[in-house]
Image (cartoon, rainbow, N blue to C red):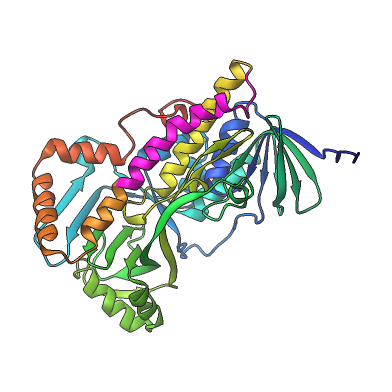
Amino acid sequence: MTKPESTDISCDVAIAGGGMVGCALACALADRGFHVAVIEPREPVSDWPADEVDLRVSALSRASQTMLENLSAWEAMSRMRVSPYQGMHVWDSGAWGSIRFDAADIGEPDLGHIVENRVTRLALWNRLGTFEQQVRLCPDRAVRFEIEGERARLKLMSGRTLEAGLLVGAEGALSPVRDMAGITSSGWDYDQHAIVATVWSEIHHGHVARQRFMPDGPLALLPVGDGRCSIVWSTSPANAEHLMKLDEEHFLRELTLASDSVLGRMARCGPRGVFPLRLRHADQYVKPGLALIGDAAHGIHPLAGQGVNLGFMDAAALADALVEARACERPLGSLSTLRRYERARKGANMGMLGAMDLFKRLFSNRNLPLKGIRNLGLGLADHSGPVKQMIMRRAMGMVGERPTLARPGNQ
């Protein structure tokens, strides 16, 4: 009979992945007295040139902002850089259909904020460091784990052994924990790649987010506070390869044309990056002793910028389920505990994934009858005040059932 390994660290919840969503969950739980361990291979970048904008940005909704305020991270983010946008303009290429949204129409100061991912992650990582009930294991990673009853036992790359009432996979789309747990995913490639960059335009963006739909994919122009735009240009893999090979002058010329010159001539461009797009959805979010959140559970087309917002709501809903379990003296890793989280988020995430997939298929094609239908729909929606207001409030996460941390004043 082999002797069981000794436990180096014991905690309530172990979170594999110290990115934005993993750190948000860790802060939420530590703030409520849970002992948490975050296992992360790389510390966040903590210093960068003031005039440099990260290639990866997110459009944070009002619900996400409220959660980050309740976690006492928003103030630190604001000191670094968050860029509010008051309007949004969406239009179809080569057609008359368009729709404009204005925060003033629903009595709000903005529709959301464009925030660099590194800003959000650093603020949450530093906030996590202020709690006594946490340990950050970095650099480290889980190399194997087993569930004993409803508790997880992990072996880490460093050789340490960790035991927890619950293991959470939050390492992103290529989650090793999800794979080690044998949880399969459904989905498909979009046959699109997204080019990301920061650009300077001839005309100031006016704090308006813009998106143009084209047959090969949408182009988003996301406003940064100093007048620049962060672009997310989804297009065919072949065209993405072509665009990435162009020098700056010719790339900017193509970008000016693709944007309909809505901001005049594109004058300068920072470094460019590219990544493939795919829809993914884990076939199950939970097993005894295990839960998946964020991109480990689902991946979505970036056309509406909802990816990290869904992840934050996962974290908030799981925190609610664990707080309730503790109050009822139920094991944190029991299926009765974790299925509350899965019920709260799986349907909502599937609905958003389905909606974004439908939008992608509706707008990213050359079908003339569909083009007429979608342009008619955009035009009608643009002239319907109640419909526009509903779209805005839903996109901001201001309607429907919300986890506790996404409600104002619930610290």
Q: Residue furthest top?
A: 328
Can the viewer see residue 200 in this picture?
Answer: yes
Of residues 148 and 331, the one nearer the viewer is 148
Q: Residue at x 54, y 40 (%)?
A: 24
Q: Where does the image place residue 93, in percent across and percent down from the top left? A: 17, 65
Numbered range of the magenta stretch: 330-354
Q: For residue 350: magenta? A: yes
What residue do we see at 19% from left, 69% from top?
Answer: 260
Query: Residue 392: x, y in percent?
Result: 24, 41
**Prevalent SS, magenta region:** helix
Residue 208 shows up from this direction: no
Q: Quadrant of the N terminus?
A: top right
**Residue 283 point in image, percent of width and height:** 48, 43
Q: Is residue 327 above or below residue 69?
A: above
Residue at the spot x=32%, y=40% of the render?
396
Up the image or down, 253 lies above or below 33; here it is below
Q: Residue at x 64, y 49 (%)?
A: 180
Q: Nearer the viewer, residue 120 or 2?
A: 2
Q: Position of residue 79 (x, y in %)?
A: 48, 48
102 within the magenta span: no
Position of 45 with respect to 155 (left or right) is left
In the figure, 220 relative to 168: above or below? below
Left or right: residue 1 compared with residue 190 = right
